Structures are given as C-alpha cells and as structure tokens.
Image (cartoon, rainbow, N blue to C red):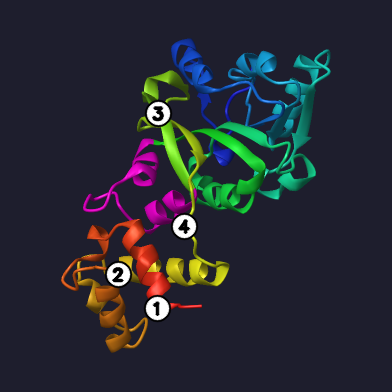
C-alpha cells in the first residue's frame, strides 16, 4: 500500500529525480551520514554508496516499518525511530569522527533545527538541508536587505552557505504553496568571543531587531546604559544613526566585545 504524507508532521516528499540528483551531487562521501526524515527513501538511495554508516531518523512509525523492510539487507543502514530534536548526536559522532547531515526538513521546525545544529556543531562536518525558500533566504541575507534579521546573524556566526539549489513546489508531493531551497552548509570560522560574550551578543541583536526601523542607539536604549552604548558604538566603528538591519555581524561582534569586556 502506498504511504501518503502525513499533514500533521508537515510531510512533503521530494519526488522529482532531476532535483534529487542535483542535491545528491553536492553531498560528498563521508564515514557516517545521518538523514533527517528520509520519508520513503527517495534521496536515501543516492546516499547508500556515499557512506559506510547511514543513520535514518524518522518519527513516522509507518515509514520506520517501511524503511526497515526496504533496507533489511543493507548492513550499514540503521533506523532511529525518533524526533531528530531528541537524538543526542554525541552518541553517534565525535570531533574526530564527525557526521554529515542530510534532510528535507519540516518547515515548522526550521529554526529549532538550526539551534540543534549549533548545539552539535563540533560533531558535524557538513549539513545538506532543504528549507522553505523564504527561510533559506533569511539565512543567506546580507545587511541592509529585507531578509536580514536576528536569525541571519545567529546562523552566520556559526555557519556559512557553500552551495544552493532552488527547488520548485512542483517537485514535491503533495505540492506545497511555495518553492523550497536546498543549501549546503559548512562551519564558519567563529570570532574570538567568550561564551559569555556570545550569549550577550545574541541577546543584544535580538533586542536591536525588535526595533529594526529605529536608529541603533534608540533600539538599544533600554538594553544598556545609553552613554555606554554610544561609546561602544564609536569604538566598534558603527554609525549611531544606522538602523539595526544595516549593521553587519562583524560590527555586532565588535560591539559585544566593547560592551562585555573580559
């Protein structure tokens, strides 16, 4: 019996072979791979020969049973019946033996998955993910554009996009209302902030973007002592008349350093 996508899990299956092959071309062989939400195995078949250990994380019990039968003879495939957010990656990978992640990700979990990737970033060699196009554009946005936001800064502090493919809605079943974007993600070279400074910086950026149309001095007016903010803006070479969405991540990093000196 054919397995249809579950609306409650926001499932859409990428079924167009042209785009499956395009995505597969970005994925380099790795000792261990983990596919999030493999569905009926449309992309999985391209991963089998790219790794010696393939973990398939699937929450839908119908699909777990289907995949168990489909790959019963594949000794290097392991099914994990779980929500990916509940999977402790440190049980499957180390900093020496990292894991490559692949997935057509549930749109409603997109930001939670970014946070998950950040948490386990030292164990992950690369991420190959399909997001809603609008979400992917926010991850790739530059200062001064409408898509540039807190999430942009949070993502780009830890990661960089090294490849992308736009996937039309017609390539999926059932067909969603908007297009998707596949992106290949690698780790970025982080700044030299301490953990305390990083936490401070993201709180500051989140505060600033609550008032993205205001001058940065006004946006951060209640975040710290106004005089300290003005002095730190000057030290970080930030124009006090700039709006939060015109300030680069590098500038926010410098500002956090000046406001949170160790």
Q: Which secondary structure, mark 3?
A: strand
Structural crowding at the residue carrying mark 3, measured as other residues with C-alpha within 10 Å and reported as few (<14), some (14–19) or many (≥20): some
Was residue 155 drawn as part of the magenta stretch in this picture? yes
Dot label at residue 259:
1
Q: Is residue 40 rendered to the left or right of residue 178?
A: right
Query: Which residue shows up at 45% across the image and 66% down it?
Result: 202
Query: Which residue shows up at 64% across the image and 47% down it?
Result: 122
Q: Name the residue under label 3.
A: 164
Structural distance between the alpha carbons of marks 2 and 4:
14 Å
User: Is 170 or 36 nearer to us in this picture?
Assistant: 36
Q: Nearer the viewer, mark 2 or mark 3?
A: 2
Q: Which secondary structure, mark 4?
A: loop
Comes first in the chain, label 2 or label 3: 3
Comes first in the chain, label 1 or label 2: 2
Q: Mark 2 points at which residue?
A: 236
Q: Is residue 222 rendered to the left or right of residue 103?
A: left
Is residue 148 visible in this depiction of the protein?
A: yes
Quarter of the figure with residue 62: top right
The picture places residue 37, in percent across and down from the top left corner, at 62, 32
What segment is highlighted magenta in the picture?
Answer: 133-158
Was residue 162 drawn as part of the magenta stretch in this picture? no
Q: Mark 4 points at which residue?
A: 191
Structural distance between the alpha carbons of marks 3 and 1:
36 Å
Structural distance between the alpha carbons of marks 4 and 1:
16 Å
Relative vertical location of residue 55 with respect to residue 23 in this rendering, above or below: below
Structural distance between the alpha carbons of marks 2 and 3:
33 Å
The picture places residue 124, in percent across and down from the top left corner, at 63, 40
Q: Is residue 76 rendered to the left or right of residue 11?
A: right
Structural distance between the alpha carbons of marks 4 and 3:
25 Å
Structural crowding at the residue carrying mark 1, measured as other residues with C-alpha within 10 Å and reported as few (<14), some (14–19) or many (≥20): some
């Amino acid at each position: 019996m054919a397995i249809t996508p579950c609306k409650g899990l926001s499932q859409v299956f990428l079924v167009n072979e042209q785009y499956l092959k395009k995505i597969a071309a970005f994925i380099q062989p790795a000792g261990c791979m983990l596919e999030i939400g493999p569905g009926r195995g449309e992309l999985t078949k391209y991963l089998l020969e790219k790794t010696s250990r393939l973990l398939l994380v699937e929450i839908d019990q119908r699909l777990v049973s289907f995949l168990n039968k489909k790959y019963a003879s594949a000794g290097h495939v392991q099914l994990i019946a779980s929500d990916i957010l509940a999977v402790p990656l440190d049980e499957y990978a180390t900093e020496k033996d990292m894991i490559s992640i692949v997935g057509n990700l549930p749109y409603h979990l997109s930001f939670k998955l970014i946070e998950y990737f950040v948490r386990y970033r030292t164990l992950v060699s690369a991420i190959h993910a399909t997001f809603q196009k609008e979400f992917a554009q926010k991850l790739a946005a530059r200062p001064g554009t409408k898509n540039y936001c807190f999430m942009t800064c949070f993502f780009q502090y830890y990661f960089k996009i090294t490849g992308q493919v736009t996937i039309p809605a017609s390539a999926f079943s059932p067909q969603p209302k908007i297009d998707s974007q596949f992106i290949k993600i690698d780790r970025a070279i982080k700044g030299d902030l301490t953990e305390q400074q990083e936490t401070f910086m993201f709180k500051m950026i989140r505060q600033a973007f609550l008032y993205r149309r205001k001058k940065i001095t006004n946006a951060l007016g209640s975040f710290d002592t106004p005089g300290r903010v003005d002095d730190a803006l000057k030290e970080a070479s930030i124009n006090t008349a700039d709006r939060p969405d015109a300030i680069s991540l590098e500038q926010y990093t410098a500002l956090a350093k000046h406001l949170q000196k160790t």
